[in-house]
Amino acid sequence: MPSWIQQAAHRGILTSRYPRVAASEPDEIPLTARGPLPTGPIGPAAVDGCPVGAISPSGVDQGRCVRCARCLATGFRFGAPIEMAGTSPASLRTSTVAPAPSGAGSLAELGRSLHVFLVDVGSCNACNLEVLALANPFYDASRLGIFFTNSPRHADVLLVVGVPTAAMIEPVRRAYEAIPAPKAVVAIGACPISGGVFRGQPGLRSSLDELVPVDLFVPGCPPAPTQILDALLTLAGRGRRER
Amino acid sequence: MSPVVRRVGAADRFDLTPDRALAYAAPDGAFALYNDYTENASWLVPGAASGSVSEIAANWLGGGDDGPTRRLAPREAVEGYGTFTFPYGPISMGVPESGRFDVVTYGERVLELTPVGGYKSRRILPSLAGATLADAALRVERLAGNVSASHVAAFLAAAESAEGVAVPTSELWTRAVAQELQRVYNHVHLLARIAEAANQNVGAAQSHALAEELLRLQGRVFGHRWSFGALLPGGPPRRLDGPGRRSLAEDLRRRREEFEELWELFLDSRTFIDRIQGTCPVPREAAVRWGAVGPTLRACGVPWDDRLRVPVAPYTDLFVPLPVERDGDALARLLVRVQEVRASLLLLEQLLDRWPAPGEAPQPAAPPVDPGRGLGRVEGPSGDLVYDVRVAGSRIAAVGVRTPSDANWPVFASGMRGAVFTDFHFALESFGLVFAETDR
C-alpha cells in the first residue's frame, strides 16, 4: 500500500528555483503574464481597439492592460519583462522595459523574513488564488522567508487584490492602520492599480493609492504567482533586479 | 449545558412546492425558471414571478442590512439565554474572499449562520448595458475568475441565442474543453482546501500541487492560467491544433494518474474521512426546497446535471457520466466532485479524440425565448448557471444571471444550523461557494 511519503518521493522536487534561476516559460510565466509591447509604430487601430485605454501612441500602460490580446492583431506581442512591479502607476507606463524600481526595498531592514496579510477589496477571485498559490509546493514562498499571517497585527506587508468597492474602503484602511511600522502595501493586478475592466464604473475607486499609500504595483490580470513573489522579494531587497 | 433557545422566526414561509425547486428568479421578476427534479424537466414561467418566488427573492435578496451589503440567505431570528451574534469577516484569512458571516451562537454550537455579501459588489451587470458583446464578455469573465469559462460560455450562448447566429462547431468544442479543464481544477482545489482545513498537510500540499499543474495546463493551452480571453474573438492564440491536442491528452493522462494516487491516499486516512463524514448534512428535501444546484444537489441523491438535462453541443454527442451520492454531507459532496473529476477527464478525452474536422457546418444557436432575448445555461463546477441576455442591434441591452452560489448560499446556511464552528471551513469549502458570483 503506498504512503504519503512514497508518493511525495515518487513525485520528486517540484519547487521552483526562482529567483536564483529565471522563471520558466510557459509553465511559471504563461504567454499573457508578460505585458504587450509594440513591434513597430503604434497605429490608431491599436489605440482604438484597446478596451481599457491602455494603449496610446506613446506606449502601453501596463497597469491598465488586462491581457485580452486584442492588440496582437495590430502589431503587438506579449514580450514585456517578467519582473515589472513599479513604485507608481506612472512607472508602468512604458513601451519598453520597466526600470527597476528605485527605493522599493523599503522593508530590506526586516532582513530575511516578511509576513503577509491579504485583503480582497473587490476581486474576481483569480488574484486571491494566485496569491495563495505562493504557498503551494511549486512556489513555496516560505523557503524565501515569506509567510502568510492571519492577523494584520502580525504582518509587514498588506497585499491588496481587486477594484476598491465602497464597502471595502473602511475595512482596508483599518487593516492598513493595524499593521505595525515598518510596513508596505502591494497592489496586485490591474484592478487596484487602474480599475482594470471596471475602470470608471460608478461606486468604484479606480486606484488603491487613493485609499492607502502603496509601495509597489504589480501589473497583470492576474499577475502570475512568480510575479507576485518578485514584488515581495523586491520589497525585501532580494528581487532578481536587485542582484 | 445547552441554553434555552427559541426560534422566533418562521423559515417555513420560504417553502416551495415539494420537489419543485426554484432555480432562477430574474432580479426584475420578469420570469422564473423552475427545475422539477422528479420529472427531470425544467420550464420557464414568463411574466411577473409568482407570489412565492417574489416573496423569497424579496426576503433574502432585499437585504435588511445597512449600506450596500445584503443577506445571501434568509435569517431566522433566534433568541435565548447566553446567545450572541458575532460577525466573521469581511476580512478573514480563513475565507480568502471578502464577505461576512453573521454567526448566532452561545459559544460553541452555531444556532444560525447568515452569509452577508455585497462587500465586493462591482456592479457588473448594469455596466454591461450598451456594451458590445466582446467588451461585455471581458467583464463577464472577470465576474468570478476561477469559473470564468462557464460564465463566458453561458453568456455567449445566451447572446448568440438572442441574436440568432450560428456558431462554428470547433468554438463550441473549445468552450467545452475550457469548461471541463476548469471543473477539474476547481474540484481539485476544493479537495486541497478541505484537506488543509483537516490539517492533512501532506495531502493538502500534494493536492495544491496538482491544482497548480492544472492551472499551468490551461496556461499552455490558452495562454492564460484562468482562460481569460480564451473563448473570445481576438483572444490569445490557443494550442488546440493536432499536436496541441495530442500533448494536452498526454498531459491529462498523467494528471489523472496523479489524481487517482492522491485520492487513494485520502481514502486511507480515517481522520480525514471521519472529519468530513456527517459534517453539514443537507437532507434531500432541504436541497430541493432551497433550490440547490450542482454537486450539492447531486450529493443528496438528485440526478440533475445541465449537461444531460438541457444538453447543448458538444455534450449531445458525448457520454456524460452522472455521479450521484445519497448522504448529503461534506463527504458526499466531495465524493461527487471526485467522481466528476474522473467524468470531466473522460469528457476531455472524448472531446480531444473526436475533434470536429475543419469546415464542419456551424451549429445554430438555441431559439430565442423572446425576440432579441436569449438564455444560456451551462453546468458550472458548482452547478446550474443561467444567463439571460437581451440585445438591441449589435449591443447588449440588459443581462441577468443566476449563479450556482446564488442558489447554494441558503443551502449552506441551512446545513450549518446546529453545527459546531470548527465545522465551518469543511462545510464552506464542500459547497464551492464564491462571493464574487453573488457580489457581481
Image (tube, rainbow, N blue to C red):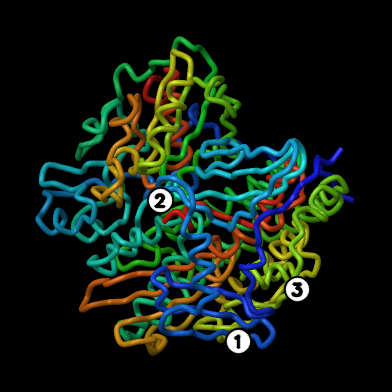
Which image quadrant is residue A242 in? top left
Q: Position of residue B60 (x, y in %)?
A: 53, 60
Task: Report the side of A77 relative to B436 (left or right).
Answer: left
Distance of label 3 from label 2 (alpha carbons): 34 Å
Q: Can you tell which mark lies on residue B41?
A: 1
- Return the residue at label 3: B301
Q: Determine whether, in the image, residue B395 is placed left or right of residue B426.
A: left
Q: CA distance from mark 2 to mark 1?
A: 33 Å
- Chain assignment, label 1: B
User: What chain does mark 3 sit on?
Assistant: B
Relative to residue B273, is residue A167 depicted above or below? above
* Mark 2 crowd level (few <14, some 14–19, many ≥20, 10 Å Cα): many
Query: Closer to the camera, B120 or B192?
Result: B120
The answer to whether residue B244 is seen in the rendering is no
Q: Earlier in the sequence, mark 2 or mark 1?
A: 1
Identify residue type, mark 2.
Ser
Q: Position of residue A7 (x, y in %)?
A: 78, 45
Task: State the CA–CA distance, disc 3 to disc 1.
Answer: 16 Å
- Is residue A24 left or right of B111 when viewed as pictured? left
- On the same chain: label 2 and label 1? yes
Check the image and report above or below for B362 versus B414. Answer: below
Amino acid type at circle 3 is Gly
Residue A148 at x, y percent in the picture: 57, 29
**Farthest residue toward the top?**
A109
Q: Is residue B87 left or right of residue B137?
A: right
Q: Chain letter of disc 2?
A: B
Name the residue that disc number 2 marks.
B121
Residue in the image at 22% along x and 41% along y: A61
- Which type of secondary structure does the marked residue at label 3 adopt? loop
